[in-house]
Image: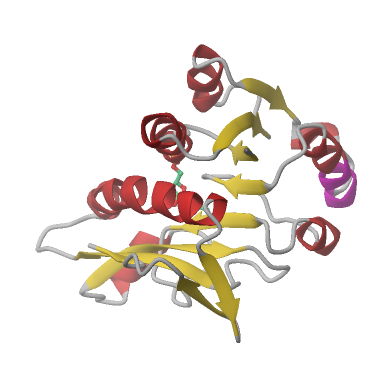
């Protein structure tokens, strides 16, 4: 049984999709805890209602990024995680933190990486005249929104779309892709070779 710890900052709909899939599909894993850096994060209520341990480590209570990450790491490690899942966790992480969870930390980012790292991804894609937008699940490294790509989802940009419409279209795909990627990890079906991730059971790593 693998322990999964999920970090959120807000709504937590990806966390919810992972919790539901873990239960419905009988993964060899349990969601050991959901932790937020924001006290009022809506996703905490869903987790608590599903009997999952919750914790808050409020970044505003710490003088530096290093201090915050050290306390976050202490709380996370109290749940003995095999996998740390960032699901809408909106904090930049220190190199010490990313090194501690190297090869066992996943993130979902709302763009087709390596394009549009950082914030406002869909708005920036619209302004660039992109015809497709998407999301990427990747292993987390010290460099923001980099790291080996586990899966990608792609959606078309349609006439009249604004950033919110694109975010909603992509989010539906995120809710299919992220649970799959987490399941692959806990089933031991991911191999990283030369910075490229292969799904060992042959499941498609592209979603649309
Ligand atoms: C998701 O769209 C996720 O891709 C994005 O935030 C949203 C969180 O929604 N993540 C990032 O922007 C990370 N830089 P959720 O809280 O409902 O899962």
Does 206 appear above or below 58? Answer: below
Does 173 appear above or below 12? Answer: below
Image x and y of residue 49, in percent: 50, 13
Q: Is 92 placed left or right of 168 in the picture?
A: right
Image x and y of residue 59, in percent: 76, 37
User: Is residue 168 part of the magenta span, yes or no?
Assistant: no
128 or 101: which is nearer to us? 101
Does 194 appear above or below 122? Answer: below
203 or 103: which is nearer to us? 203
Q: Residue at x 52, y 33 (%)?
A: 10
Determine the image quadrant of residue 132: bottom left
Quarter of the figure that contains the N terminus? top right
Colour approach in the figure? secondary structure
Residue 90 visible to an observer of this rendering: no
Q: Is 188 placed left or right of 70 in the picture?
A: left
Determine the image quadrant of residue 79: top right
Quarter of the figure that contains the C terminus? bottom left
Q: Residue at x 33, y 69 (%)?
A: 125
Q: Residue at x 58, y 37 (%)?
A: 8
Image x and y of residue 40, in percent: 59, 21
Determine the image quadrant of residue 34: top right
Provide the residue span drawn in magenta.
65-70
Q: Residue at x 58, y 67 (%)?
A: 145
Image x and y of residue 47, in percent: 53, 22
The residue sitting at the bottom extreme is 194
Residue 167 visible to an observer of this rendering: yes
* Tally of numbered tags: 0
125 or 93: which is nearer to us? 93
Query: Which SS does the magenta portion mostly show?
Result: helix
């Amino acid at each position: 049984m693998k322990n999964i710890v999920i970090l959120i900052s807000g709504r937590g709909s990806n966390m919810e999709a992972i919790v539901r899939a873990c239960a419905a599909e009988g993964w060899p894993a349990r969601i050991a805890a959901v932790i937020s850096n924001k006290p009022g994060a809506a996703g905490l209520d869903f987790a608590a209602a599903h009997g999952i341990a919750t914790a808050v480590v409020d970044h505003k209570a710490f003088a530096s990024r290093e201090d915050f990450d050290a306390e976050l790491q202490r709380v996370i490690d109290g749940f003995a995680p095999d996998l740390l899942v960032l699901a809408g966790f909106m904090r930049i992480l220190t190199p010490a933190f990313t090194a501690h969870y190297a090869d066992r930390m996943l993130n979902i980012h709302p763009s087709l990486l390596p394009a549009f790292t950082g914030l406002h991804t869909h708005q920036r894609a619209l302004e660039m005249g992109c015809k497709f937008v998407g999301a990427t699940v990747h292993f987390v490294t010290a460099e923001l929104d980099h790291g080996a790509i586990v899966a990608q989802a792609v959606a078309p940009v349609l006439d009249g779309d604004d950033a919110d419409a694109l975010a909603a279209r992509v989010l539906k795909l995120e809710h299919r892709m992220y649970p799959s990627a987490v399941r692959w990890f806990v089933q031991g079906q991911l191999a990283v070779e030369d910075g490229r991730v292969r799904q060992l059971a042959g499941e498609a790593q592209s979603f649309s």
